[in-house]
Image (tube, grey):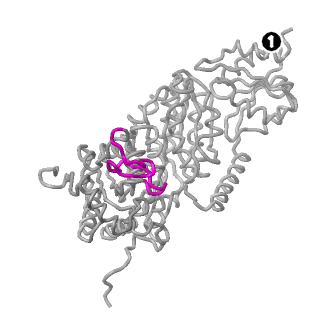
Amino acid sequence: MAIVFEKPKSLTDAALHYCPGCTHGIIHRLVAEAIDGLDMQSQTVGVAPVGCAVFAYNYFNCDMVEAPHGRAPAVATGIKRVCPQNLVFTYQGDGDLAAIGTAETVHAASRGENITIIFVNNAIYGMTGGQMAPTSLPNQITQTSPYGRDVKTAGYPIRVCEMLSTLSGTAYAERVSVDSVPNIRKAAKAIRKAFDVQKAGKGFSIIEVLSTCPTNWGLNPVESLDWLRDNMMPYYPLGVYKDKTAEGGDAK
Amino acid sequence: MSQRVLMKGNEALAEAAIRAGCRYFFGYPITPQTELAAYMAKRLPKIDGCFLQAESEIAAINMVLGASAAGARVMTSSSSPGISLKTEGISYMVGSDLPALIINVQRGGPGLGGIQPSQADYWQATKAPGHGDLHILVFAPDSVQEMVDTVANAFALADEYRMPAMILADGMLGQMMEPVTLPEECGVTLPEKSWATNGHAGDARNIANSLYIDAVELESLVRARFARYAEIEEKHSQHEAYALEDAEVVVTAYGASARVAKAAVREARAKGIKAGLLRPITLWPFPKKAYEDAAKTAKSFLCVEMSMGQMVDDVRLAVGGKRPVAFYGRTGGIIPTPAEVLGEIEKQAGGTE
């Protein structure tokens, strides 16, 4: 009998701890499938963040390092400099990457560090119970913006792909979403593309994945997908922001 | 043939690290350790090594964490304010059982402090180099030669016990030039690191992690680490005893201030005062037994530091109230003079005849 569908080798059998309706599980699977697709499970080192994905080292079935909050790109830099032949990726949320770890992110990109960042943007701090994130939208209600994010006092959300695409060291930057089957398929391709860019030694790559947080958004899973489409996508347009491999160099 | 060369302390530390097999350096500029990083920037690219100037001390120590997890012999260096920034990474490295060498060329504090030599980071190095229940190995050489000799040993013990090691130098030791004999530049065999996260899969995969949500599991891991600490205290405490056999006034100091103290002890002896010097070479583990032994014959102790008195706490604990322990220190970047220390020795000895 032909096997038509199975769990990726690069995921362990551990049950995910994520909340019902959370899209981390889908993104984990896409990353694991991309590693399997390259047949690089035994040459991959992943770096887990602090935040909801802190236990990622239990799920990705490859060598893993758990980094201090925001420091994953620096940790990945150390690993990659020692093991340039390995596929090195970080898996980070918006608070980890775009608040406490902004310097590490920007400088890893500016160095053209040959690593891949999987950036899960759900516009909120999930693990600590729903605080305002650097990517929370204007007027978004969170535990620490109970009257809505007031841009006059809390500033504006950061568009990470747009920002990093201005840096010469960034080889590939794409924003994708996992809100629908077609978008999930595009996200899978994007992650594979980023790993290919790394494998080819072209430099820094980042895939930003728009993701949901039903628990802290206070919505059911279906409403959450709608909220992502209606609110996040207009502010965070999907697409390729930088592609050094494309003819003519940069997109957009 | 071993070479005898004249070298600045900071550069000698760097060359010694290279000769100990270190090929990875991650740092951030700060006075007065500058020459160490500059030396690495010059040398490492020529020998297939990696010198990387990070965006901050925080990033640098986390690059060290990553390189160490990947199995490399790796180091960073900084000075007091920069070490404060590294404490987060140091704690995570301890919690993940990762070795590395960290050099602190101390300057005056607190805050931005000054850029002159100081020993005001003793508490930080030995009591709280990061949050949590932890220790790191702390070495306090007192000459350029001893700094050179300490480097390979610090790397080896860090690897053996899977923990960070620190060389607690200061601006004086880092900046001064002395003749040194460098170790042979022969190939160092680095230990196998079966735990390294450098590419495994399935059941054989490795994880470097400091997170343990289960309190019982975390307690047992910390207890296991403290059992290792007890073994280190037993096996690896080091000190120098100078003129201690019949010493009535036991002067105790480490690093640069020990050099001043030794000169004062010599002068005291010339004046007929029975003074001696007990110099800890490891600050953690602290050589407690040496103080217990010295307390049997000494009438009093005098602790000399370039701080307001930090190591003196450990001296008092080790002496255990059996003898009085006096303190003399200068701080803010001022080095005590032998004459000042001699004056304090004379006070302890009850004045000169």
What's under tag 1, amino acid-wise? Lys
For the residue pair B190 and B259, the one nearer the viewer reads as: B259
Prevailing SS of the magenta stretch = loop
Image location (x, y in percent) of residue B315: 76, 32
- Mark 1: which secondary structure? loop
Q: Residue furthest left?
A: A248
| For residue B178, above or below residue A209 | above
Q: Is residue B259 magenta?
A: no
Q: Is residue A136 magenta?
A: yes
- Residues in magenta, as a range: A125-152
For the residue pair A68 and B173, the one nearer the viewer reads as: A68
For the residue pair A79 and B265, the one nearer the viewer reads as: A79
Question: Seen in the image, is B316 located left or right of residue B53?
Answer: right
Which residue lies under the disc numbered 1?
A: B271
The image quarter in which residue A151 lies: top left
Tag 1 subunit = B
Question: Seen in the image, is A18 located left or right of residue B311?
Answer: left
The image quarter in which residue B331 lies: top right
Residue lying at 50% horizontally and 61% vertically, measured from the top left = B207
Q: Residue furthest front?
A: A147
Asked whether residue B301 appears in the rendered view, the answer is yes
| For residue A176, above or below residue B162 | below
Instruction: Using a 10 Å C-alpha cutoff, classify the residue at mark 1 as few (fewer than 14 neighbours), some (14 to 19) or many (20 or more).
Output: few
Quadrant of image for the N terminus of chain A: bottom left
For the residue pair A134 and A167, the one nearer the viewer reads as: A134
The image quarter in which residue B296 lies: top right
Image location (x, y in percent) of residue B28: 43, 35
Image location (x, y in percent) of residue B335: 62, 18
| For residue B318, above or below residue A144 | above
Image location (x, y in percent) of residue B241: 75, 30
Asked whether residue A39 appears in the rendered view, the answer is no
